[in-house]
Amino acid sequence: MDNPSTERTAAAVRPGEPLWVTAAPAMLVFLWSTGFIGAKWVLPYIEPFTVLAIRFGAAAVIFVAIALATGAPWPKSWRPALHASIVGILLYGCYLTGVFWAISIGTPAWISALVTSLQPLLTAVLAGPLLGERVTARQWIGFLLGFGGVALVVWRDIGGDAGSVAGLIVLVGALFAFSGGTLYQKGFGETNDPRTGQVVQHVAAFAMLVLLAALFEEQRIEWTAELIVGLFWIIVVLSVGMFSLLYFLIKRGAVSKVSSLFFLVPPVVAVEAHLLYGETLGMTAVLGMVLAAAGVYLVTRSR
């Protein structure tokens, strides 16, 4: 008889699902990839801690409105609220702060995407002992194949200017926060209603970033059309839409399978950088994308 984690994995793909549910993983990959482009887009006009404080504060207000309009239940005690706060600090505060800060000091967005794309490997290693999820040999092969594809896409940048050592160290910390937040949400955060849980998570991350901005930044903002468009995208589309979609996928399937989707993010970032900034894509990049897609298929396909 299959264990409970296997049953959850098999239940992640159900026949006769609506088209938007089937397309949800592809939507998540696209939206997540635009986070790196969005960071590069807004950072010339605003400091990283300040922009994230605005992002989390505005998203918290939006989720409060959603929760009140839909009658969502609020946490009934301090314990679920504490769990939601920890998830918010890890998944929003630490992960996104690390990415934005590294890019702001000159670490290439490619390197940020590469380092954080290692999250599926780290999550798979930790999901076994912490959540009891079983990762098969086929899935491990998929993880390694996906990593190889990602490495092929960005290998030229690894050999060149990889940014400061401080930026890379911060990105590694962001990687651990990303995996930790995902696993903690799966293990402890699912008792909260996702609407009010998001309020608590964003408020916790907002408090963290307000403190960081007050301590280390001057909060200077150059209001331009580009910044306004960028703020709308990272607040409404990413903070509200994308993270809601992420939690939806985590709730439906095994956490290591959901995490494996992020192997596709760096290749998609490469396509977006080509379209927006004219960066060319060689055959090495194309081959890397194919390998990454094959790795994701091996890890995520149902039995």
Image: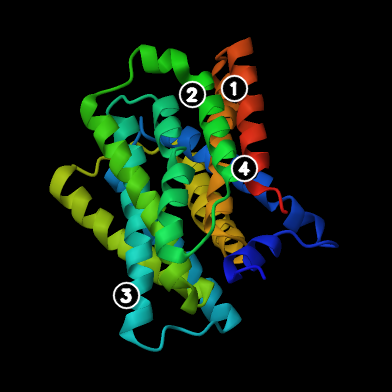
The residue at which mark 2 appears reads as: 151
Residue 142: quadrant of the picture: top right
Q: Amino acid at mark 2?
A: Ala
Q: Secondary structure at mark 2?
A: helix
Q: Amino acid at mark 1?
A: Gly
Q: Earlier in the sequence, mark 4 or mark 3?
A: 3
Q: Assign a secondary structure to mark 1.
A: helix
Say if residue 139 shows up in the picture: yes
Q: Which mark is residue 288?
A: 1
Looking at the image, is mark 2 or mark 3 earlier in the sequence?
A: 3
Q: Which residue is mark 4?
A: 138
Q: Quadrant of the C terminus?
A: bottom right
Disc 4 crowd rating (10 Å Cα; few below 14, some 14-19, many 20+) is few
Marks 1 and 4, the one that precedes in the sequence? 4
Distance from disc 1 to disc 4, alpha carbons, whole Å, reads 19 Å
Quadrant (top left/top right/bottom left/bottom right) for the N terminus: bottom right
Q: Vertical placement of 64 versus 78: above or below?
A: above
Q: Which residue is mark 3?
A: 82
Q: Position of residue 150 (x, y in %)?
A: 52, 27
- Disc number lying in front (4 or 3): 4
